[in-house]
Amino acid sequence: MPTMLSLSKKLSHELSNLDIDEGVRIESTKIKNRKMYINKRPSECFVAELVYSNHINMTEITFYVDTRHISKLIDKIFGKEYSVTIY
């Protein structure tokens, strides 16, 4: 099983290599109502949309320049149990 560090490093690599028309969806495997969508903008920064869909649908949008900050956010929100889909 890959370590958390290698998963974060692989995800950072995938994010860096995204084309403008591609994105990443991250879903919690533990909490079903939590998702994150990450896309790369033409300015080379990233936009992360965090979606909580419980009783009140809530969306939080944040811009990032560095993939390390995104990896830290993912670890904080999802812990070790999440799935990643590149689209």
Image (tube, rainbow, N blue to C red):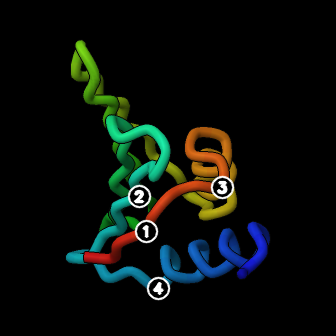
Residue at image position (41%, 58%) is 26
Give the quadrant of residue 22: bottom left
Of labels 3 and 1, the one closer to you: 3
Q: Secondary structure at mark 1?
A: strand
First in sequence: mark 2 vs mark 4: 4
Q: Marks 1 and 4, Cα distance to the nearest angstrom?
A: 15 Å
Instruction: Name the residue nearer the viewer: 64 or 74.
Output: 74
| Structural crowding at the residue carrying mark 3, measured as other residues with C-alpha within 10 Å and reported as few (<14), some (14–19) or many (≥20) | some
Q: Residue at x 32, y 82 (%)?
A: 19
Determine contact: label 2, label 1, CB under 8 Å: yes
Quarter where residue 81 is shown: bottom right
> Residue 39, located in which quarter of the rendered image?
bottom left
Question: Disc 4 designates what residue?
Answer: 17
Residue located beneath label 3 in the image: 80
Q: Nearer the viewer, residue 87 or 30?
A: 30
Using the image, determine if residue 55 lies above or below residue 19.
above
C-alpha gap between disc 4 and disc 3: 23 Å
Q: Which residue is mark 1?
A: 84
The mark found on residue 26 in the picture is 2
